[in-house]
Image (cartoon, grey):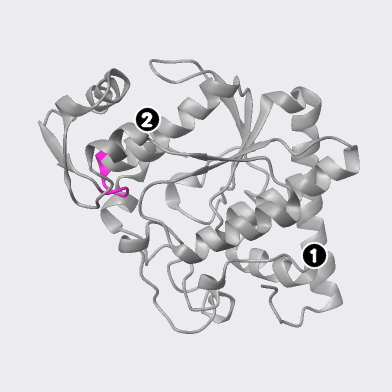
Amino acid sequence: MIIEKEVSEKRKRQCAKLVDISKDIITQALDKFKPEELGVTWTGGKDSTLNLWIVRQVCQDNGVSLPRTMIIGEGDEFEEIEQFVEEIKKEWDIPLEICRNDDVLKAANYTLNAPVKVRDLNERNRSEIERIGFDGEEFPFEAESYVGNHLMKTVVFNQFLERHNIKGIFQALRWDEHPTRFNDEYFEHMEAGHLVPEHTRIRPILHFTEKDLWDTYPAFNIPYCALYEKGYRSLGAKTTTVKGSDIPAWKQDLENTEERGGRRQDKEKAMERMRKLGYM
């Protein structure tokens, strides 16, 4: 889907300047790392799709292949996102890898809220549970809980880096999205640690605001997931994400309302703690 929204020529130029800043960051990354050492995180959401679109533009301009791209299958996905991802994967020829923590999914019998016994998990997941300080014997399977979020997302992310020897990974974070991201840098080197491989996180769209993003989409005819048309502003797990309005995201009061208000709030409050453990 393409947003049918009028964007003035002045605003298009402003959006183009923002895109150019992002392209410069990506170009720096291509100078620093070999293409095979780079990766891209994608969720099918508005931020990561814009990020992926810009990375793709730079790669095309430089005659290099789009880096290996990962998307996390957390076991609680919107069908609309899955459909959108499949369409864009084919249209943009994305080297996409769907990454899952199959050990946890199997222990939960692929059922949301089913109890997962720690003793049934493999050594890596038991070590990760110990690393985050969880000392219970079991936990319910849900991707947005503290334990579930770590096992289904952070662990999977680190395993992707390990599996492909990724040195630099493009992430779609914005300064205005969440207070824990206010001080993020375009390039952040992560030292190797227990169960965490050394890598650099590259964040090309940090400077975009939510409004900038929704003006850039129609300015460049970038496709988006249909859920935003229905009123969702920030997408997480299907069962814990709610929409605050029935009007399209870009028509809502972006400056005076919370972008992530429809996301699970205990996770939002624990964001700083999760990020210290390697959450994206």
Q: Secondary structure at mark 1?
A: helix
Q: Residue at x 32, y 47 (%)?
A: 143
Pointer 1 residue: 14
Marker count (numbered): 2
Q: Residue at x 72, y 25 (%)?
A: 36
Residue 278 in sight in this render: no
Residue 101 location (% of width, % of height): 37, 35
Q: Secondary structure at mark 2?
A: loop
Per the image, is 145 magenta?
A: yes
Q: Is residue 30 above or below residue 43?
A: above
Residue 272 location (% of width, % of height): 36, 41
Residue 38 location (% of width, % of height): 68, 29
Residue 150 location (% of width, % of height): 33, 36
Q: Is residue 269 above or below residue 6?
A: above
Please tell me which residue lies in front, 181 or 139. 139
- Describe residue 48's horizontal placement relative to residue 137 as left or right: right
Please tell me which residue lies in front, 27 or 239. 239
Callout 2: few (<14), some (14-19), or many (20+) C-alpha neighbours within 10 Å?
Answer: some
Residue that extends furthest to the left in the rendered view of this protein:
137
Closer to the N terminus: mark 1 or mark 2?
A: 1
Pointer 2 residue: 277
Per the image, is 101 magenta?
A: no
Magenta residues? Answer: 142-147
Amino acid beneath label 1: Gln
What's the mark number on residue 94?
none
Q: Is residue 246 above or below residue 273?
A: below
Give the distance between the C-alpha atoms of the residues marked 1 and 2, in whole angstroms.
36 Å
Q: Residue at x 76, y 83 (%)?
A: 6
- Describe residue 116's horizontal placement relative to residue 206 as left or right: left
Amino acid beneath label 2: Leu
